[in-house]
Amino acid sequence: FCITGPPSAFSAAVEGLYLEIISKASEPTLLFFCLPTESFVLEIGVWGEPHHQDNAGRSTELIQEMKNKETIYLGVDINDRSFVQDDENNFHFLQSDSMDTEKIHAKIKELGIEGFDFIFIDGWHSVNAVLHEWKHYVIPFLNKGGILVFHDTNSHPGPYVLFDSIDEEVFESEKYCLGNHYGLGAIWYRKDS
């Protein structure tokens, strides 16, 4: 499944993976596919409750609805979001604080994942937590040609500080701010890095 009409920076910078943010009611919605058929997705901060009406248009639900069966998804959340676990469709969940690097790295290894094509981070938003996630999950696991999206780049200190501090010789980035929304920011490796 493909969402067409990506922002111009993505069409030039990220092959086979498009990000489009559309407005759905008053809440922006993230649509983020064309992933390669066999790809890997990491979501830190799994959103929602089982069969809850407020899940509509949220990142986790969109991933569930739009990913192909071959794509392996790993969701990590400090709360029990095991309702997303679906082995048959390659949906895996780990209840963990994102600061527990050893536990998360063990799960990544267990699933046979060497790198992620898409990482969506909407976990704890402190500067320390976001820097930890960057150091332990993005730098070692974001594939070249992959993309990282942070939520809350306009309103919380961690994503805001990190997003504005990336090495522009290695990464490209773009922020999306729709109205009074908390903001989304995308980061990907430069083609020449």
Image (cartoon, rainbow, N blue to C red):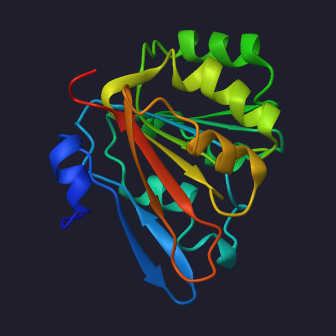
When asked about the image quadrant of residue 21, the answer is: bottom left
Picture residue at 65% right of the left edge, 10% below the top: 106
Judge by depth and name the residue closer to the eye, 185 or 165. 165
Q: Is residue 171 above or below residue 62?
A: above
Q: Position of residue 26 (x, y in %)?
A: 58, 88
- Residue 41 image-quadrant placement: top left
Instruction: Give me the residue at 26% from left, 45% from top.
Output: 17
Which corner quadrant holds the N terminus? bottom left
As drawn, 106 above or below 96: above
Image x and y of residue 166, in percent? 52, 34
Residue 171 in the figure: left or right of residue 51:
left
Q: Is residue 29 visible?
A: yes
**Residue 191 picture location, percent across and down:** 22, 29
Q: Nearer the viewer, residue 175 or 132?
A: 175
Q: Which residue in the rendered view is the most extreme toward the bottom?
A: 25
Q: Position of residue 57 (x, y in %)?
A: 52, 72
**Residue 45 in view of the camera:** no
* Image quarter of residue 98: top right
Which residue: 36% across, 57% down? 66
State the residue at coordinates (28%, 20%). Answer: 193
